[in-house]
Image (spheres, rainbow, N blue to C red):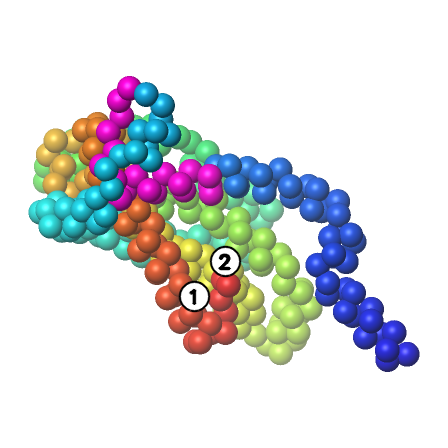
Amino acid sequence: MYKASAIKTVRGNSLWYRLKEQKWLFVLMFPAFIATLLFSYGPMFGLYMAFTNYQPGGGSFLHQFFGAEFVGLKWFEYFFSTGDFYRVMRNTLATSLLTLLFGFPAPIILALMLNEAKQGFFKRFTQTVSYLPHFISWVIAANIVITLLASDGMLNNFLVMLGVIKEPVAFLQNGPLFWWIIALSNMWKEMGFSAIMYLAAISAINPELYEAARVDGASRFRQMWHITLPALRPTIVILGILAVGGILNAGFEQQYLLQNNTVLEYSEVIDIYAYKYGLQNSMFSYGAAVGMFKSVVAFILVVIVNNISRKVNDQALF
């Protein structure tokens, strides 16, 4: 009996057995696997450009690409030695940290508030309105922000009416304020959609836990603190690790669309910098080196935060 059970366990753990038993799941996963190879891993051979002095010209692409002069770490050294490095990193980190500060807890708070709402219509309406901005392109969203923050916009008129300010403030012409505008815009646009993941995790909580807590006299706040938040912890940890790993992904569209000549010193982040030099100035190898630097830093941050989380909370992404 024990021998048969052991043989069954070994078979159940074997790769071939799982492939056979779950073959249709793997068939459904196959197109996504191919798409990932083609569009995520395939273009990675282009990272070789960061170590060469690539210049497009006549002839085949592969011959020019692999025949370009190998310069090693020249472009990385050039990036670190220029005065642009400090400015670009300052803008990127400032924008990303502010976005993380406001944007990470906002969907958690929204999900908790929606979970506590008892009116079905109000709950559905609020959830729909909150995640609608996610589906609006940044072209439209940027125009909404520009109109709202204009000198004769709604925010200035409202603040003047309340007596908070005496005259309109040029929000989009103030460099340090630009970081806050980007962070709050990111929060507004993605808060509702990100809350869906937390609401899905909340819906998986056993209702009997809340019933038992109510029997023990726990208030709504106590139920949220001792039942809902602990159940959300794995989701919070995983999304937190990914958010820290993307700390250098300050964005491109929002900065590019909201910036103007008066705030260029504060709006140029790594993505815009790589675009400007890599495509506009045709310094393809230099742009690739800047982009690769960002990716390597993101990978290192994910590994570090993941290991710290595993040791502290026994929760990790991998």
Please provide percent x and percent y for residue 98. 27, 53
* Amino acid type of the residue that numbered disc 2 sits on in the rendered structure: Leu
- As drawn, the label of residue 306 is 1
Q: Secondary structure at mark 2?
A: helix
Relative placement, left or right, of 43 versus 73 is right
Q: State whether residue 104 appears in this view.
A: no
Q: Toward the viewer: 65 or 146? A: 65
Q: Toward the viewer: 12 or 242? A: 12
Please provide percent x and percent y for residue 202. 58, 59
Question: Which residue: 57% across, 74% down?
Answer: 218
Does residue 172 show up magenta in the picture?
no
On screen, 28 above or below 150? Answer: below
- Name the residue that disc number 2 marks: 112
Does residue 49 show up magenta in the picture?
yes
Please provide percent x and percent y for residue 45. 40, 41
* Amino acid type of the residue that numbered disc 1 sits on in the rendered structure: Asn
Please provide percent x and percent y for residue 300. 35, 60
Relative placement, left or right, of 105 versus 29 is left
Q: Toward the viewer: 146 or 77? A: 77
The number of numbered badges drawn on the structure is 2
